Amino acid sequence: MKIIRVSRVFHELFGEETTRLDLLAILSAAFLGTGLVLWFDFEHLRMLSFPVLMIILVLLADILGGVVANLTKGTASYYKERESLRQIFIFIHVQPILFALLIQNHVIESIFIYLYVALSATMINSIRHLPQHKAIAMLMFMFGALMLLLFGTSMSPYVLIFFIFFMMKMIVSFACSHTHYRKNL
């Protein structure tokens, strides 16, 4: 598969190099996924002002594309070589709070989600050398998503989608190691 050298501006998103297939998968997740959410929950999204809607769609594209990007070799290698950036990456992802402030709703919930994800991702990041870290990460994601689904019944579908995929991006896709596999059980 042909390797594509990535411009320095996009290293944090795609790594220093990637493949066409990985790039296509990331961009498809970002744009097609965002388009599907827009189509699926247009009833709620159309109530937002146009500037807020555009920012929300960009944030959603970042989250959806990030779920896939963090699973690719290019992005994983980039952060594996820059361990100090891993924790910074976790804590600067304040998108749930920004998202809630933009829609002027669910601010308290967004703060709890941010804190839960930051703590979960930090814990998983610190044990990523253990073979069990992926199972623990999935447990943390599943617990958070279930709590959100059970207690977030007043949330619009696009809000639930945003928060759940944010958790997936940070806890499962980013915090876990996807570059080496267990040889023995």
Image (tube, grey):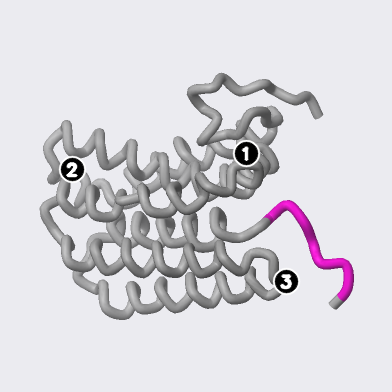
Secondary structure under badge 2?
loop
Q: Is residue 57 left or right of residue 24?
A: left
Q: Position of residue 30 (x, y in %)?
A: 47, 39
Which span of residues is magenta-colored?
178-184
Q: Which residue is mark 3?
A: 131
Three-letter code, disc 1? Tyr
Q: CA distance from mark 3 to mark 1?
A: 21 Å
Q: Determine if the magenta segment contains residue 116.
A: no
For discs 1 and 2, the disc positioned in front in the rendered view: 1
Out of 71 and 182, give the one closest to the viewer. Answer: 182
* Crowding near the residue tagged with mark 2, few <14, some 14–19, many ≥20 C-alpha atoms within 10 Å: few
Q: Position of residue 5 (x, y in %)?
A: 67, 21
Answer with the quarter of the image where residue 53 lies.
top left
* Crowding near the residue tagged with mark 1, few <14, some 14–19, many ≥20 C-alpha atoms within 10 Å: many
Three-letter code, disc 2? Arg
Q: Which residue is mark 2?
A: 46
Q: Which residue is mark 1?
A: 78
